[in-house]
Image (cartoon, grey):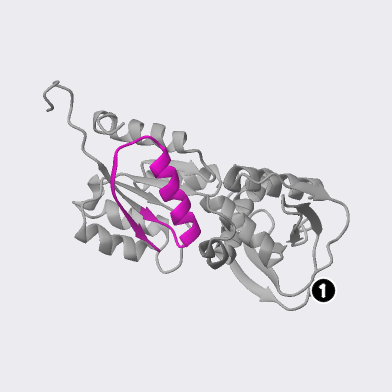
């Protein structure tokens, strides 16, 4: 707690998972503009790289694409859901518009939310606050 | 079965360029004259009908797209180094937008992975529909759709 009694700001550590370097940079830019207190931003090019990074680093939230080579976003969500530690980390799917059936499937297997590309930084901020609740508002 | 139109393709691409890269591109009637090298990106999709979407633009057009997506100056070397990746990403978003607008969100659909190539000539390709937009720099970006024929009655 600070001297004023307000909740101490703790920066959010994020992991961006996308096979496109341009998209990773765009998401990183949106993150920097969204008004949240951001700490480390890690990047991975596919689900396999993401799992390796998650085992080595503290991450508060994962922003993952779906269509990726090696291991796609669907498998990443499934693998994280099956891991006791990783299952606690919320995953937001950041992907191109898709069918309702696919979105439902992603939410069923453990993704916390879906954000359609392209998106505005405010949309990301609102989603993070919704998912992290009080934890998220401490970062805003 | 609804058939795709050049207006639909132009609208989908124009909206994606505006929302992803803050580029206001206008549809043009004339087919562009291509001078190599030509950057091309291709994406296959499966839904009620399968097909392929392609984007084609000169290198300078792809650099403009990359620079706008990344919020950097087109003269920044990163804009050139990321230009093909940017074209692929625009096509990826175009693919999702087209499939959900054309076939709807109630039916399953699947996008492939976009891939890019540098062409030294514009090949004759089968296509169902085509539209060309002009970027703010004046460079063209062409979108082509090759849609598989609709299945006949069983």
Q: How many labels, in total?
A: 1
Q: Secondary structure at mark 1?
A: loop
Up-down relation of residue A88 to residue B137 (above or below) = above
State yes or no: residue A10 in magenta.
Answer: no
Note whether residue A133 is visible: yes
In which quadrant of the rendered view does residue B124 lie? bottom right
x, y percentage for residue B145? 74, 59
**The C terminus of chain A - image quarter:** top left
Instruction: Look at 63% across and 56% down and name the residue there.
Output: B64
As drawn, is B11 to the left or to the right of B19? right
As drawn, is A54 to the left or to the right of B126? left
Magenta-highlighted residues: A16-45
Instruction: Look at 26% across and 45% down and name the residue there.
Output: A60
In which quadrant of the rendered view does residue A42 lie? bottom left
Up-down relation of residue A62 to residue A75 (above or below) = above
Instruction: Look at 72% across and 52% down and name the residue there.
Output: B135
Furthest-right residue in view? Answer: B30
x, y percentage for residue A90? 30, 44
Note whether residue B109 is visible: no
Furthest-bottom residue in view? Answer: B120
Instruction: Look at 25% across and 30% down and name the residue there.
Output: A138
Furthest-front residue in view? Answer: B75
Name the residue carrying label 1. Answer: B124
Up-down relation of residue A10 to residue B98 (above or below) = above
As drawn, is B122 to the left or to the right of A129? right
**The N terminus of chain A - image quarter:** top left
Q: Nearer the viewer, residue A110 or B19?
A: B19
In which quadrant of the rendered view does residue B66 lie? bottom right
x, y percentage for residue B41? 65, 66
Up-down relation of residue A22 to residue B97 (above or below) = below
């Amino acid at each position: 707690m600070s001297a004023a009694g307000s909740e101490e700001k703790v920066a959010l550590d994020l992991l961006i998972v996308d096979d496109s370097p341009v998209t990773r940079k765009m998401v990183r830019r949106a993150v920097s503009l969204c008004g949240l207190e951001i700490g480390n931003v890690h990047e991975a090019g596919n689900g396999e790289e993401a799992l390796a990074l998650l085992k080595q680093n503290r991450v508060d939230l994962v922003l993952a694409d779906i269509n990726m080579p090696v291991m796609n976003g669907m498998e990443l969500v499934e693998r994280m859901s099956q891991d006791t530690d990783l299952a606690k980390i919320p995953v937001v799917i950041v992907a191109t518009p898709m069918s309702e059936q696919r979105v439902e499937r992603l939410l069923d297997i453990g993704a916390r939310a879906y954000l359609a590309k392209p998106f505005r930084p405010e949309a990301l901020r609102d989603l993070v606050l919704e998912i992290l609740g009080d934890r998220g508002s401490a970062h805003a | 079965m609804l058939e795709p139109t050049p207006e639909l393709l132009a609208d989908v691409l124009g909206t994606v360029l505006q929302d992803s890269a803050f580029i206001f591109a206008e549809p043009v009637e004339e087919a562009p004259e291509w001078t190599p090298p030509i950057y091309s990106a291709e994406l296959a999709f499966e839904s009620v009908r399968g097909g392929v979407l392609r984007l084609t633009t000169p290198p300078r057009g792809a650099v403009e797209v990359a620079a706008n997506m990344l919020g950097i100056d087109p003269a920044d070397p990163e804009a050139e180094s990321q230009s093909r990746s940017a074209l692929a990403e625009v096509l990826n978003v175009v693919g999702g937008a087209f499939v959900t607008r054309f076939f709807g969100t109630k039916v399953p659909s699947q996008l492939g992975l976009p891939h890019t190539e540098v062409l030294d000539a514009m090949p004759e390709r089968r296509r169902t529909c085509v539209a060309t937009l002009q970027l703010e720099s004046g460079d063209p970006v062409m979108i082509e759709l090759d849609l598989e024929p609709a299945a006949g009655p069983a």
